[in-house]
Image (cartoon, rainbow, N blue to C red):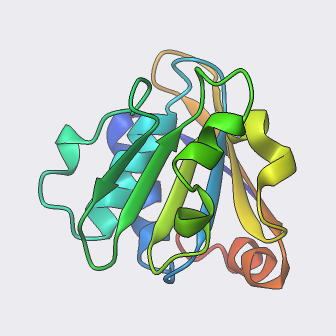
């Protein structure tokens, strides 16, 4: 499924709507170039999960992970700076991937070989200044059904 957004607010709204359908343990793999809108999308997820100060959500480029308390925890990874995923072993990434929260990974294509078998892949492409093309691909039945349903789209 593909969704186009034409403003930052619309991109946030798609993330917010998707968040309302997420369950504990869900994993979202975000893929896109620098400036594509991955972190903006995460702000929408945060808003949808009940994080009041969602505007303060920013990319954990240097810390690799940030945790936010919400309806259930939001674990926000940014693996852009990782040359290899061995660093993730030092922070016990599996405890986040198989947890009671939502795990979102920016630059997930860099660690595709350690992603769980089932996850929601979201590819964000910057078309113009505020226009984004957002592609959703489900890996596993739950995520395929979520994409097929598409009730969270604009």
Residue 56 placed where, x, y %?
18, 39
Residue at left offset 58%, top offset 20%: 81
Residue at left offset 51%, top offset 19%: 35
Examine the rendered structure and indicate whether residue 34 appears above or below residue 7: above
Examine the rendered structure and indicate whether residue 91 appears above or below residue 109: below
State left or right for residue 17 relative to residue 114.
Answer: left
State left or right for residue 131 relative to residue 83.
Answer: left
- Count of numbered circles in the view: 0
Residue 135 placed where, x, y %?
73, 48
Residue nearest the viewer, comparing 84 with 78: 84
Residue at the left extreme of this rendering: 52
Residue 140 visible? The answer is yes
Q: Quadrant of residue 55?
A: top left
Q: Quadrant of the N terminus?
A: bottom right
Residue at left offset 50%, top offset 80%: 21
Residue nearest the viewer, comparing 28 with 133: 28
Residue 153 visible? The answer is no
Q: Quadrant of residue 74?
A: bottom left
State left or right for residue 147 relative to residue 25.
Answer: right
Residue nearest the viewer, comparing 130 with 61: 61
Residue at the front extreme of this rendering: 90
Residue 54 placed where, x, y %?
21, 50
Residue 16 placed where, x, y %?
38, 62
Examine the rendered structure and indicate whether residue 63 appears above or below residue 96: above
């Amino acid at each position: 499924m593909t969704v186009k957004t034409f403003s930052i607010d619309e991109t946030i709204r798609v993330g917010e709507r998707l968040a309302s359908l997420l369950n504990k343990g869900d994993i979202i793999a975000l893929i896109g170039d620098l400036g594509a809108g991955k972190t903006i999308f995460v702000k929408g997820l945060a808003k949808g999960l009940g994080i009041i100060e969602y505007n303060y959500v920013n990319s954990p480029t240097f810390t690799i992970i940030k945790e936010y308390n919400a309806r259930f925890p939001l674990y926000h990874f940014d693996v852009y700076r990782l040359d290899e995923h061995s660093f993730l072993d030092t922070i016990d990434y599996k405890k986040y991937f198989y947890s009671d929260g939502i795990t979102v990974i920016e630059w997930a294509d860099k660690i595709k070989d350690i992603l769980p078998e089932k996850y929601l892949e979201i590819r964000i492409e910057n078309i113009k200044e505020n226009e984004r093309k957002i592609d959703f691909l489900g890996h596993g039945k739950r995520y395929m059904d979520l994409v097929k349903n598409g009730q969270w789209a604009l």
